[in-house]
């Protein structure tokens, strides 16, 4: 069992920045990838960014260089640095860990971009 604890969400003005953190604990060996997804009201959950065990990263097309995913293996933590935030970025952001036959989700953290 892998537990994912997210933090860093909150209210930010358009153009501002936030950094989300996701700390993994438990039986977290053999994780193939970790990523961030988000879900806005009335819309399906969508991929934001993904980082693999080999440090390859993938981003949604609409990120356009604004977001950066990274990890700290010593802390078992993955981060999402978000810059130039827009109101359309408002959503619940979820951390996901992928093992060979299991997927684990964090509880989600709310990001609200508004003036």
Image (tube, helix red, strand yellow):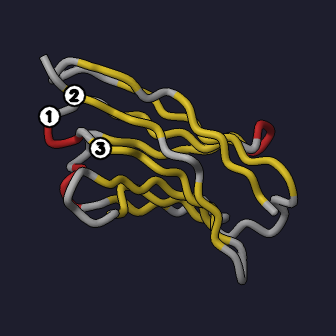
Give the percent coordinates (x, y) of residue 11: 31, 21
Residue pictured at 80% horizontal, 69% vertical: 30
Mark 3–mark 1 contact, CB under 8 Å?
A: no
Estimate how packed mark 2 is, as few (under 14), some (14 to 19) or many (20 or more) residues with alpha carbons within 10 Å.
Answer: many
Q: Using a 10 Å C-alpha cutoff, classify the residue at mark 3 as few (fewer than 14 neighbours), some (14 to 19) or many (20 or more).
A: many
Left or right: where 109 falls relative to 102: left
Count of marks overlaid on the render: 3
Q: Is residue 53 left or right of residue 94?
A: right
Between the residue at mark 3 and the residue at mark 1, the CA separation in whole angstroms equals 9 Å
Residue drawn at point x = 46 percent, y = 53 percent = 36
Question: Measured from the top left, where is residue 81 in percent x and y?
Answer: 42, 34
Q: Could you tell me which secondary element the residue under label 3 belongs to?
A: strand
Q: Secondary structure at mark 1?
A: helix
Vertical arrangement, residue 43 with respect to residue 82, above or below: below
Q: Which residue is mark 1?
A: 87
Q: Is residue 36 above or below residue 89?
A: below
- Position of residue 9 measured from the top left corner of the image (x, y, whole percent): 43, 29
Instruction: Using the rendered view, name the quadrant where residue 18 is placed.
Output: top left
Tell me, for residue 91, which label it has, or none. 3
Look at the numbered discs 1 and 2 and tell me whether their residues touch, using CB distance below 8 Å. yes
Which one is earlier in the sequence, the residue at label 2 or at label 3?
A: 3
What numbered label is drawn on residue 103? Answer: none
Q: Quadrant of the N terminus?
A: bottom right
Task: Give the residue at x 32% y 63%.
Answer: 46
Residue 78: image quadrant is: top right
User: Could you say which disc has been placed on residue 113 in the image?
Assistant: 2
The secondary element bearing badge 2 is classed as: strand
Counting residues from the N terminus, which is met first, the one under dot 1 or under dot 2? Answer: 1
């Amino acid at each position: 069992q892998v537990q994912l604890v997210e933090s860093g969400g909150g209210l930010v003005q358009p153009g501002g920045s936030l950094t989300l953190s996701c700390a993994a604990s438990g039986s977290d060996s053999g994780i193939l990838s970790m990523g961030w997804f988000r879900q806005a009201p009335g819309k399906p959950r969508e991929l934001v960014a993904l980082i693999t065990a080999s440090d390859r990263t993938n981003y949604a097309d609409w990120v356009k260089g604004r977001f950066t995913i990274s990890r700290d293996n010593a802390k078992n933590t993955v981060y999402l640095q978000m810059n130039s935030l827009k109101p359309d970025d408002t959503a619940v952001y979820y951390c996901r860990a992928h093992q060979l036959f299991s997927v684990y989700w964090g509880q989600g953290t709310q990001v609200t971009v508004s003036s």
